[in-house]
Image: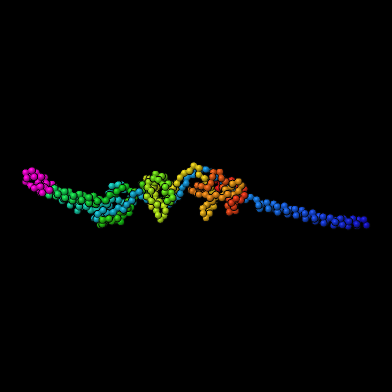
Amino acid sequence: MTNKTIPFLKSRNLLKKLPVLGLTCCLVFTLNSCKEKTESKRNFSGNLQAIGYIAQGQTFTSEIIVPGKILAMEELYVTAPLSGLVTEINFKEGQHVQQSEKLIQIDDRHFQSQLKALKSQLLTAENDLKRKSQLVDVEGVSTEAIDLAKAKVLQLEAQMEELEVKIDLASIQAPFSGKIGMRDISVGTWLNTGQAISTLVQDDRLKIQFEIPGAYAAKASVGQKIRFIATTSSDSAEAEIYAINSSIDATSGSIQLRAKIDNKEKKFVVGDFVQVVYNLQTSNDALLVPADAIVPQLNGQIIYIVKSGKVQSKPVTTGGRTKSMVQILSGLSAGDTVIISNLMKIKDKAPITINQIRTEAQL
């Protein structure tokens, strides 16, 4: 009897305790739930975290990259100065020729024969003038006759000079040293005055023609150095600005410049395109920020900095740039912490926590 009642009593005692256990569980669950809500609320209302970059003064050369083209310092079409038959061609296509080297000979025999005849006539005219000048002392000839004799001599001399010029022009020479181009004529070709024979370019001294925005026109000066990279060969070199156009082009808003190149090694070819690296100015305390930190606005650009633990937007003016950094000309001070992450989530004057500072090398 006793053995049978003991389990029953235990069951009754357990049943009496169940409400108490249930209440205790509810209290624990409620407390845990409230704790989770409190923690969740704290996380939700906590400061946004972001990465920062501290702006510091550094040496920076502001530059722009613009397209350009290589031109010959001197270039011309070799043309026939007078009409005539080609009797000699003294150059090979594509070869280098020296200044004053004879390129083409046009038949000048008729000029030579005319000159020879005029020399004979001039000799006779000079003797006639000499004889008459001697007779004037004894009044054996009139002054008018002497004047006519002098005029005859001067006329013949002028005709001879004209023929000598034509003979000289018949021998077509290189006006400067350079590379001669192709020809479309042969010995025996009849040339008309002004007809093209070939091209001649000065290839040991070249020039680069390029344009920069008119806003930088005041910074350009003769003697400035530029760097350039040739498109075809990828060779690079330095050139010196020697000419600046007198005005800004009204259509493009750019100003044209020319720089000279020493090309004695023949590394560059006329007509090739180049990329010109033009240095605007060098600053020893320039402030640069990561390009991703710049936020475009309708009326300009801004960056976000941290001030007393809160976000502060700052309108800025940008300058030159590198691959990853942008120069700030105004709106930023040295030592400012610039926000460079979570830019789409932050709001002006909102609290923020910078959990990491990165340097330019870590960007």
Main SS of residues in magenta: helix
Residue 358 screen position, x and y as percent: 57, 46
Q: Residue at x 36, y 50 (%)?
A: 72
- Say if the magenta span includes residue 140: yes
Can residue 325 be seen in this snapshot?
Answer: no
Q: Is residue 113 left or right of residue 48?
A: left
Q: Residue at x 82, y 56 (%)?
A: 19
Residue 222 screen position, x and y as percent: 39, 45
Q: Nearer the viewer, residue 319 or 123?
A: 319
- Say if the magenta span includes residue 182: no
- Colouring mode (rainbow / by chain / secondary structure / one colour): rainbow
Q: Residue at x 9, y 44 (%)?
A: 134
Can residue 255 be seen in this snapshot?
Answer: yes
| Number of numbered discs on residues | 0
Q: Is residue 243 left or right of residue 12?
A: left
Quarter in which the N terminus is drawn: bottom right
Q: Is residue 61 left or right of residue 15?
A: left
Residue 262 screen position, x and y as percent: 38, 45
Q: Residue at x 81, y 55 (%)?
A: 21
Magenta region, residue range: 120-147
Q: Residue furthest right?
A: 1
Residue 231 screen position, x and y as percent: 43, 51
